[in-house]
Amino acid sequence: MDTRRFRLALAGAAVAAACAAVPASAGATNYVAMGDSYTSGPGIEPYSPTNPAACGVSERSYPYLVAQALNLSLTDVSCGGAKTSDETESQLEGQPPQDEALSASTEVVTLGMGGNDHNLFGTLVEGCTILDYYIKPSNKSPCKDNYEGFVTKTFAEDKPEQEAALRHIKELAPNAKVFVIGYPEIIDRPCPNFPWYEKDALWFRNKVQKVGDKLIEEGAKANGAIFVNTFKPSEGHNACQEVGTRWIEPLFNSLTGVAVHPNALGQQQDSYDIELAMLRAGIR
Protein backbone atom coordinates (compact mmCIF):
# COMPACT_ATOMS: atom_id res chain seq x y z
CA MET A 1 0.00 0.00 0.00
CA ASP A 2 1.43 3.40 -0.92
CA THR A 3 1.74 6.19 1.63
CA ARG A 4 -1.34 8.11 0.55
CA ARG A 5 -3.55 5.02 0.55
CA PHE A 6 -2.22 4.15 4.01
CA ARG A 7 -3.10 7.65 5.25
CA LEU A 8 -6.55 7.30 3.70
CA ALA A 9 -7.08 3.97 5.44
CA LEU A 10 -6.06 5.45 8.79
CA ALA A 11 -8.40 8.41 8.32
CA GLY A 12 -11.21 6.05 7.39
CA ALA A 13 -10.64 3.99 10.50
CA ALA A 14 -10.78 7.10 12.67
CA VAL A 15 -14.04 8.19 11.07
CA ALA A 16 -15.51 4.72 11.49
CA ALA A 17 -14.63 4.75 15.18
CA ALA A 18 -16.29 8.14 15.62
CA CYS A 19 -19.39 6.96 13.79
CA ALA A 20 -19.82 4.04 16.16
CA ALA A 21 -21.04 6.45 18.82
CA VAL A 22 -23.14 8.59 16.46
CA PRO A 23 -26.33 7.35 14.75
CA ALA A 24 -25.99 7.32 10.97
CA SER A 25 -28.09 9.90 9.15
CA ALA A 26 -30.90 8.61 6.98
CA GLY A 27 -29.98 8.48 3.29
CA ALA A 28 -26.70 9.11 1.55
CA THR A 29 -24.97 12.49 1.59
CA ASN A 30 -25.89 14.63 -1.42
CA TYR A 31 -22.77 15.35 -3.49
CA VAL A 32 -22.57 17.63 -6.55
CA ALA A 33 -19.45 17.47 -8.74
CA MET A 34 -18.78 20.55 -10.89
CA GLY A 35 -15.83 20.96 -13.22
CA ASP A 36 -14.12 20.69 -16.57
CA SER A 37 -12.49 17.77 -18.42
CA TYR A 38 -9.97 17.14 -15.63
CA THR A 39 -13.04 16.23 -13.59
CA SER A 40 -15.20 14.55 -16.23
CA GLY A 41 -12.51 12.14 -17.45
CA PRO A 42 -12.78 12.07 -21.28
CA GLY A 43 -11.15 9.08 -22.94
CA ILE A 44 -11.82 6.80 -19.97
CA GLU A 45 -14.57 4.27 -20.57
CA PRO A 46 -17.29 3.53 -19.66
CA TYR A 47 -19.05 6.86 -20.13
CA SER A 48 -22.06 7.94 -18.13
CA PRO A 49 -25.25 7.31 -20.16
CA THR A 50 -27.07 10.15 -18.40
CA ASN A 51 -24.67 13.00 -19.20
CA PRO A 52 -24.29 14.76 -22.59
CA ALA A 53 -21.92 12.75 -24.78
CA ALA A 54 -19.97 15.91 -25.62
CA CYS A 55 -19.03 16.34 -21.96
CA GLY A 56 -17.05 13.08 -21.84
CA VAL A 57 -18.19 12.11 -18.33
CA SER A 58 -16.54 8.85 -17.34
CA GLU A 59 -17.89 6.51 -14.69
CA ARG A 60 -14.26 6.03 -13.65
CA SER A 61 -13.66 9.73 -13.02
CA TYR A 62 -12.91 10.91 -9.51
CA PRO A 63 -16.49 12.05 -8.69
CA TYR A 64 -17.77 8.51 -9.26
CA LEU A 65 -14.86 6.93 -7.39
CA VAL A 66 -15.25 9.29 -4.43
CA ALA A 67 -19.01 8.74 -4.31
CA GLN A 68 -18.56 4.98 -4.35
CA ALA A 69 -15.85 5.01 -1.68
CA LEU A 70 -17.71 7.28 0.74
CA ASN A 71 -21.28 6.21 -0.11
CA LEU A 72 -22.32 9.63 -1.40
CA SER A 73 -25.31 10.33 -3.65
CA LEU A 74 -23.67 11.84 -6.74
CA THR A 75 -24.93 14.41 -9.21
CA ASP A 76 -22.11 14.96 -11.71
CA VAL A 77 -22.53 18.05 -13.91
CA SER A 78 -18.88 18.34 -14.98
CA CYS A 79 -18.21 18.79 -18.68
CA GLY A 80 -15.14 18.91 -20.87
CA GLY A 81 -14.24 22.45 -21.89
CA ALA A 82 -16.17 24.06 -19.02
CA LYS A 83 -15.14 27.51 -17.86
CA THR A 84 -15.99 29.27 -14.62
CA SER A 85 -18.69 31.16 -16.53
CA ASP A 86 -20.43 27.82 -17.22
CA GLU A 87 -21.31 27.64 -13.55
CA THR A 88 -24.06 30.18 -14.30
CA GLU A 89 -24.43 29.85 -18.09
CA SER A 90 -25.41 27.00 -20.39
CA GLN A 91 -22.29 25.50 -21.95
CA LEU A 92 -24.07 23.31 -24.53
CA GLU A 93 -27.44 23.67 -26.19
CA GLY A 94 -30.07 22.17 -23.93
CA GLN A 95 -27.65 21.77 -21.04
CA PRO A 96 -28.45 23.79 -17.89
CA PRO A 97 -25.76 25.76 -16.07
CA GLN A 98 -23.80 23.63 -13.65
CA ASP A 99 -25.11 25.54 -10.64
CA GLU A 100 -28.67 24.35 -11.30
CA ALA A 101 -27.65 21.12 -9.57
CA LEU A 102 -27.11 23.01 -6.30
CA SER A 103 -29.70 23.52 -3.58
CA ALA A 104 -30.08 23.86 0.17
CA SER A 105 -30.04 20.04 0.36
CA THR A 106 -26.58 19.81 -1.24
CA GLU A 107 -24.10 18.67 1.42
CA VAL A 108 -20.85 18.26 -0.53
CA VAL A 109 -19.53 20.08 -3.61
CA THR A 110 -16.33 19.54 -5.54
CA LEU A 111 -15.24 22.22 -8.00
CA GLY A 112 -12.46 21.46 -10.46
CA MET A 113 -12.44 24.34 -12.88
CA GLY A 114 -10.50 27.40 -14.05
CA GLY A 115 -7.92 26.08 -16.51
CA ASN A 116 -10.13 26.91 -19.49
CA ASP A 117 -10.93 30.46 -18.39
CA HIS A 118 -9.95 32.91 -21.14
CA ASN A 119 -8.87 29.76 -23.08
CA LEU A 120 -5.66 29.61 -21.05
CA PHE A 121 -5.05 25.85 -21.20
CA GLY A 122 -5.87 25.35 -24.86
CA THR A 123 -3.98 28.44 -25.97
CA LEU A 124 -0.79 27.35 -24.23
CA VAL A 125 -0.91 23.68 -25.20
CA GLU A 126 -1.53 24.51 -28.86
CA GLY A 127 0.66 27.60 -29.02
CA CYS A 128 3.66 26.12 -27.24
CA THR A 129 3.51 22.99 -29.36
CA ILE A 130 3.40 24.97 -32.61
CA LEU A 131 6.33 27.13 -31.53
CA ASP A 132 8.52 24.48 -29.90
CA TYR A 133 7.85 21.49 -32.13
CA TYR A 134 6.83 22.79 -35.53
CA ILE A 135 8.43 26.23 -35.90
CA LYS A 136 11.48 25.65 -33.65
CA PRO A 137 12.83 29.20 -33.41
CA SER A 138 16.39 29.79 -32.26
CA ASN A 139 15.53 31.47 -28.95
CA LYS A 140 15.50 29.06 -26.01
CA SER A 141 12.05 29.84 -24.55
CA PRO A 142 9.74 30.85 -27.42
CA CYS A 143 6.54 29.90 -25.62
CA LYS A 144 7.41 31.85 -22.49
CA ASP A 145 8.54 34.82 -24.56
CA ASN A 146 5.31 34.84 -26.55
CA TYR A 147 2.73 34.04 -23.87
CA GLU A 148 4.08 35.30 -20.54
CA GLY A 149 2.11 38.56 -20.77
CA PHE A 150 -1.05 36.67 -21.75
CA VAL A 151 -0.72 34.42 -18.70
CA THR A 152 -0.17 37.32 -16.30
CA LYS A 153 -3.20 39.17 -17.67
CA THR A 154 -5.35 36.04 -17.60
CA PHE A 155 -4.50 35.24 -13.99
CA ALA A 156 -5.38 38.78 -12.93
CA GLU A 157 -8.75 38.56 -14.71
CA ASP A 158 -9.51 35.00 -13.55
CA LYS A 159 -9.07 35.52 -9.83
CA PRO A 160 -12.13 37.73 -9.13
CA GLU A 161 -14.33 35.63 -11.42
CA GLN A 162 -13.34 32.39 -9.71
CA GLU A 163 -13.86 33.84 -6.23
CA ALA A 164 -17.28 35.20 -7.26
CA ALA A 165 -18.21 31.69 -8.41
CA LEU A 166 -17.32 30.27 -5.01
CA ARG A 167 -19.46 32.86 -3.27
CA HIS A 168 -22.33 32.04 -5.62
CA ILE A 169 -22.00 28.32 -4.87
CA LYS A 170 -22.22 29.08 -1.17
CA GLU A 171 -25.36 31.13 -1.72
CA LEU A 172 -27.06 28.30 -3.60
CA ALA A 173 -25.78 25.51 -1.34
CA PRO A 174 -25.39 27.17 2.09
CA ASN A 175 -25.20 23.86 3.94
CA ALA A 176 -22.51 22.31 1.74
CA LYS A 177 -18.85 21.75 2.38
CA VAL A 178 -17.06 22.91 -0.76
CA PHE A 179 -13.83 21.29 -1.96
CA VAL A 180 -11.84 23.06 -4.67
CA ILE A 181 -9.68 20.63 -6.63
CA GLY A 182 -6.31 21.76 -8.00
CA TYR A 183 -4.65 20.52 -11.16
CA PRO A 184 -1.97 17.78 -11.28
CA GLU A 185 1.54 18.15 -12.66
CA ILE A 186 1.49 17.93 -16.46
CA ILE A 187 5.16 18.26 -17.43
CA ASP A 188 8.48 18.95 -15.73
CA ARG A 189 10.86 18.44 -18.67
CA PRO A 190 10.80 17.75 -22.41
CA CYS A 191 10.44 14.18 -23.68
CA PRO A 192 9.76 12.52 -27.06
CA ASN A 193 5.98 12.54 -26.56
CA PHE A 194 6.00 16.08 -25.14
CA PRO A 195 8.70 17.81 -27.21
CA TRP A 196 8.72 21.33 -25.82
CA TYR A 197 11.88 23.32 -25.19
CA GLU A 198 13.29 22.71 -21.73
CA LYS A 199 12.91 26.31 -20.55
CA ASP A 200 9.32 26.40 -21.78
CA ALA A 201 8.49 23.14 -19.98
CA LEU A 202 9.92 24.52 -16.73
CA TRP A 203 8.14 27.84 -17.20
CA PHE A 204 4.83 26.09 -17.80
CA ARG A 205 5.29 23.96 -14.69
CA ASN A 206 6.56 26.63 -12.29
CA LYS A 207 5.00 29.87 -13.52
CA VAL A 208 1.75 28.68 -15.08
CA GLN A 209 0.67 25.52 -13.29
CA LYS A 210 2.05 26.16 -9.81
CA VAL A 211 1.13 29.84 -9.78
CA GLY A 212 -2.34 29.07 -11.16
CA ASP A 213 -2.90 26.43 -8.49
CA LYS A 214 -1.73 28.88 -5.82
CA LEU A 215 -4.27 31.45 -6.95
CA ILE A 216 -7.03 28.84 -6.90
CA GLU A 217 -5.96 27.80 -3.41
CA GLU A 218 -5.97 31.40 -2.16
CA GLY A 219 -9.45 31.92 -3.58
CA ALA A 220 -10.72 28.74 -1.94
CA LYS A 221 -9.39 29.67 1.48
CA ALA A 222 -10.69 33.25 1.22
CA ASN A 223 -14.20 31.93 0.58
CA GLY A 224 -14.49 29.18 3.15
CA ALA A 225 -13.74 26.28 0.81
CA ILE A 226 -11.23 23.45 1.26
CA PHE A 227 -8.44 23.25 -1.31
CA VAL A 228 -7.30 19.79 -2.40
CA ASN A 229 -3.76 19.86 -3.75
CA THR A 230 -3.32 17.24 -6.47
CA PHE A 231 -0.13 18.79 -7.88
CA LYS A 232 2.28 17.71 -5.18
CA PRO A 233 1.11 14.06 -5.03
CA SER A 234 1.33 13.86 -8.83
CA GLU A 235 4.96 14.99 -9.08
CA GLY A 236 6.93 12.33 -10.90
CA HIS A 237 3.77 10.96 -12.51
CA ASN A 238 3.49 13.52 -15.30
CA ALA A 239 3.02 13.03 -19.03
CA CYS A 240 6.70 12.27 -19.65
CA GLN A 241 6.70 9.15 -17.50
CA GLU A 242 6.26 5.58 -18.69
CA VAL A 243 2.89 3.88 -19.02
CA GLY A 244 1.85 2.66 -15.58
CA THR A 245 3.72 5.49 -13.87
CA ARG A 246 2.17 8.49 -15.59
CA TRP A 247 -1.19 9.85 -14.50
CA ILE A 248 -1.40 12.32 -17.40
CA GLU A 249 -1.35 11.34 -21.06
CA PRO A 250 1.22 13.11 -23.31
CA LEU A 251 0.81 15.30 -26.38
CA PHE A 252 1.63 12.46 -28.75
CA ASN A 253 0.75 8.76 -28.46
CA SER A 254 -1.91 9.24 -25.80
CA LEU A 255 -3.33 5.86 -24.79
CA THR A 256 -6.77 7.34 -24.07
CA GLY A 257 -6.95 9.34 -27.27
CA VAL A 258 -7.22 12.54 -25.21
CA ALA A 259 -3.86 14.28 -24.95
CA VAL A 260 -2.68 16.20 -21.88
CA HIS A 261 -5.46 14.87 -19.64
CA PRO A 262 -5.61 12.44 -16.73
CA ASN A 263 -5.85 8.75 -17.49
CA ALA A 264 -7.74 6.23 -15.35
CA LEU A 265 -4.82 5.96 -12.94
CA GLY A 266 -4.70 9.74 -12.58
CA GLN A 267 -8.41 9.91 -11.82
CA GLN A 268 -8.01 7.17 -9.24
CA GLN A 269 -5.13 8.93 -7.54
CA ASP A 270 -7.07 12.21 -7.47
CA SER A 271 -9.93 10.36 -5.81
CA TYR A 272 -7.63 9.24 -2.98
CA ASP A 273 -6.60 12.84 -2.26
CA ILE A 274 -10.20 14.05 -2.33
CA GLU A 275 -11.48 11.19 -0.18
CA LEU A 276 -8.83 11.93 2.41
CA ALA A 277 -9.74 15.63 2.46
CA MET A 278 -13.42 14.75 2.83
CA LEU A 279 -12.81 12.30 5.65
CA ARG A 280 -10.76 14.91 7.47
CA ALA A 281 -13.64 17.37 7.01
CA GLY A 282 -16.11 14.93 8.55
CA ILE A 283 -17.78 13.70 5.36
CA ARG A 284 -19.07 10.17 5.79
Image (cartoon, rainbow, N blue to C red):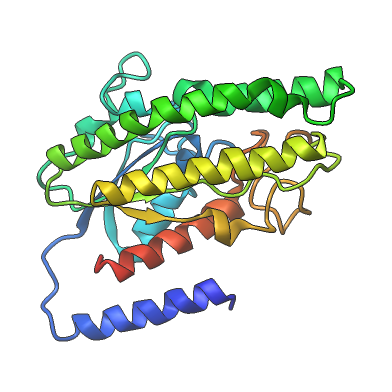
In the displayed structure, would residue 196 be above or below residue 31?
Answer: above
Rendered position, 124 above or below 277: above
Q: Residue furthest top?
A: 93
The residue shown at (30%, 52%) is 221
Q: Residue at x 63, y 45 (%)?
A: 206
Q: Is residue 116 left or right of residue 206?
A: left
Q: Tell me where residue 78 sits by quadrant.
A: top left
Position of the C terminus, as image quadrant, is bottom left
Q: Give how far across and how far down residue 134 sits, in percent.
A: 84, 20
Which residue is drawn at the image coordinates 73% and 34% (left, top)?
Answer: 251
Residue at the outermost right position: 138
Near-viewer residue (98 or 76)? 98
Residue at 29%, 36% in the rendered image: 163
- 279 sits to left or right of 57: left
Residue 171 lies, in percent from the top left, at 13, 38
Q: Position of residue 186 (x, y in %)?
A: 65, 44
Image height of 177 relative to 258, above or below = below
Looking at the image, residue 254 lies above or below residue 281: above
**Which picture quadrant has residue 35?**
top left
Horizontal side of residue 73 vs 143, given as left or right:
left
